[in-house]
Image (cartoon, rainbow, N blue to C red):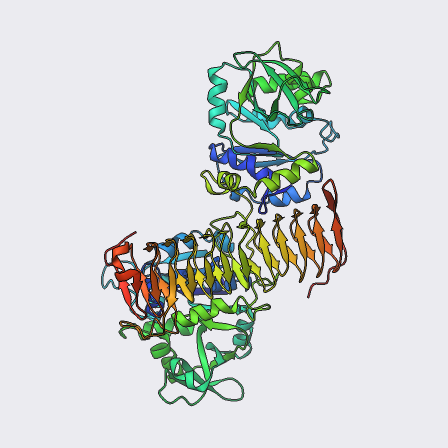
Amino acid sequence: MPIAGSYRSIDFVLSSMTNSHIQKVAVFTQYNAGSLNEHLSSSKWWDFGRKQGGLYVFTPAVTSDNNYWYRGTADAIYQNLAFLKNSHEPYVIIASGDGVYKLDFNKVLEYHIEKKADITVVCKEMEPGEEVERYGIIKTDDEDRIEEFEEKPVVARSNTVSCGIYIIRRRQLIELIEKCAEEDRHDFVRDILIRYKSLKRIYGYRMKGYWRNIATVDDYFRTNMDFLKPEIRDYFLHQYPDIYSKVDDLPPAKYNAGSDISNSLISAGCIINGSVTDSVLFRKVFVGNNCYIRNSIILNDVYIGDNTHIENCIVESHGTIRANSYHRAEDRIEVIVESNERYII
Amino acid sequence: MIKKEMIAMLLAGGQGSRLGVLTTRMAKPAVPFGGRYRIIDFPLSNCINSGIDTVGVLTQYQPLRLNTHIGIGIPWDLDRNIGGVTVLPPFERNVHSEWYTGTANAIYQNIEYMESYNPEYVLILSGDHIYKMDYEVMLDFHKANDAAVTIAAMPVPIEEAKRFGIVITDDEHRITEFEEKPEEPHGNLASMGIYIFTWKVLREALIANADQPNLDFGKHVIPYCHGKKERLFAYEYSSYWKDVGTLYSYWQANMELIDIIPEFNLYEEYWKIFTKCETLPPQFIAKGAFVEGSIIGEGSEIYGKIYNSVIGCDVFIGPNSIIRDSIIMNATRIGADCDLNKAIVAENAKIGKNVKLGIGDETENETDPEIYNHGLVTVAEHSVLPDNISIGKNSVVSGVFEAEDFEGGMLAPGKTLIKAGERR
């Protein structure tokens, strides 16, 4: 998913990995992987174009003895276990591609070794009042060893949530995954973390910095809007280490007469003729004359015709919005998908 | 054996002294243009878009910035197993080492490089023009005419003709006469400094003239070929082509990008211009800011008001500052309450609070009136300007300044203030 005008969510984890000097990364894709594969078309953006290591993309493949899609996170690893077996690195980091954060994995690994843990789970203490029921909820003892782990409970008993980032020894992982597969279990959280929580030493590493998961529309909207805050922008975009992404070679943004922008992020390749307030515009957005855009997210390559009003909305990428349209969501964020015919000269 | 049909040689070693302080520490082709590009991006992008994948870049004057920019050619897809981009600085040899003494001399010194690709044709380019051109079409023209040399040329106003090499052609575009910067031009078809040579002809001409001091294409090689009755043709070109050799033309070319639909359109899908991307983040336009008729590069944070200006990447413009008709290059910081009029502020400059640039009348510049004119104010890269000062039109400043450097907080129009020895 595109984040903060110029990035995609996977850039954050890949950048954190390259900045932690991890050289070998495997990406498992399955759901609607076209745009992701395109984004990962070259490993050079994250400095993964190496002779030692590199970026590997694994999609489900039909073989003579297996024709399943990935049936779960553990199954995705199981289906590509040969890759793990043929590697020689002692540790494995498992992370999802939908978190927005910066993390030094070396610190997590140091912690993992210091605690003599079997598995370390990166977790984040959420602000009180935050709805945490859609996450994995963790309860630890005084030593930070995980006592309880509940996936999406009805009532959360703590506000520490799992970030979906794990460190585990490679051999240990192979062993657990193989056992899982034998028992026909496929989910890493349910069938490994929760099942083994008393048997294995599982520790929680508390992340200090910004972390957000973009699983829901609301989360997605809020995460993007967070980038309008100077301290968040400074943390992600101006402080070392950087976040890397695929380079697009777009011209700088252009503001024609009649444009009026306030408190907004504008990306490369945009051409703006109208008014934009409190919004995030992704790359190559065209805003026509006399438009009014407020509190909205406009994704990549959207064309907005003249005299259009958009408020509290997310406009899907490659959309074409006809002139004189009116979109105003009242109490929740609305997603606009419009693929009207566009004429390119 | 390696065989390339046509390779390009890009002359990027010149200082470009008419750009004043902009080229004190970098060669002209490395000068930023249009918010996020550098001038050399245009010929390099033209090469790859024309299907030329082997480019030698000849460097000499202040090459550091150029070298880091080009690298191994990744931004232009010129990182190739065979060919790609090669930076060619002058080098020492067993006997008779020298700098590049002229355009053709530089090419002559790299005969070995060209020979290693065994080309049929060699394209000679210079790194100081803004244009989009399909060199393959020009090559087709060259082949169709069975030419030895093809010179790209475009009509210029007759009064400007004496600044260029002028070609006079017959009805078939064959060149009958060639005049280098003539006092009294007999035509207005100007050479654009883009040549296609049949490699055998070029090789012979370079070796025959090897001892000519300051061997130059316009002055020596072209007249030599003409004298030998080789088939010289003019390839007439009429789209956008801009020489950004002077500070004023450089400023003009930047300003032309701002037009609603500029003559030179960077927003077309076809014929993309590639560049090394140093920053990615989106730009932020704050509450209370205003932007109109401008282009702004990535990662910039705008709190002030911008009218008709070209702003680079990673620029910060403070609240209540007004920027008008100006060029602000990458990573420059401008404080609050400033007022900039027709200013060119180079990279990494720091401008304090309440600084006024471009005041007073257009007094002629005291040291270099032929460079600093038309009311432009120029601030060199890495300059630091203190709070509460004013600088007049046609002035230029370079260096790290304190308040006491400006008597009465003011630098009169037409002054040159350059602190020598400042590195940063």
Q: Nearer the viewer, residue A160 or B72?
A: A160
In the image, is B20 to the left or to the right of A208?
left
Residue A77: in sight, yes or no? yes
Q: Position of residue B196 (x, y in %)?
A: 46, 72
> Residue A180, relative to residue B270: is it above or below?
above
> Residue A230, relative to residue A196: is it above or below?
below
> Looking at the rendering, which quadrant does residue A194 occupy?
top right
Q: Position of residue A20 (x, y in %)?
A: 47, 32
In the image, is B65 to the left or to the right of A148?
left
Q: Residue furthest front?
A: B408
> Residue B18, relative to residue A76: is it above or below?
below
> Residue B369, relative to residue B410: is it above or below?
below
Residue B41: in sight, yes or no? no
Q: Position of residue B103 (x, y in %)?
A: 35, 70
In the image, is B106 to the left or to the right of B44?
left
Q: Nearer the viewer, residue A97 or B385?
A: B385
Q: Residue furthest top?
A: A199
Q: Residue at x 72, y 42 (%)?
A: A333
Q: How many marks?
A: 0
In the image, is A272 to the left or to the right of A63?
left
Q: Nearer the viewer, residue B419 or B210?
A: B419
Q: Position of residue A202 (x, y in %)?
A: 57, 15
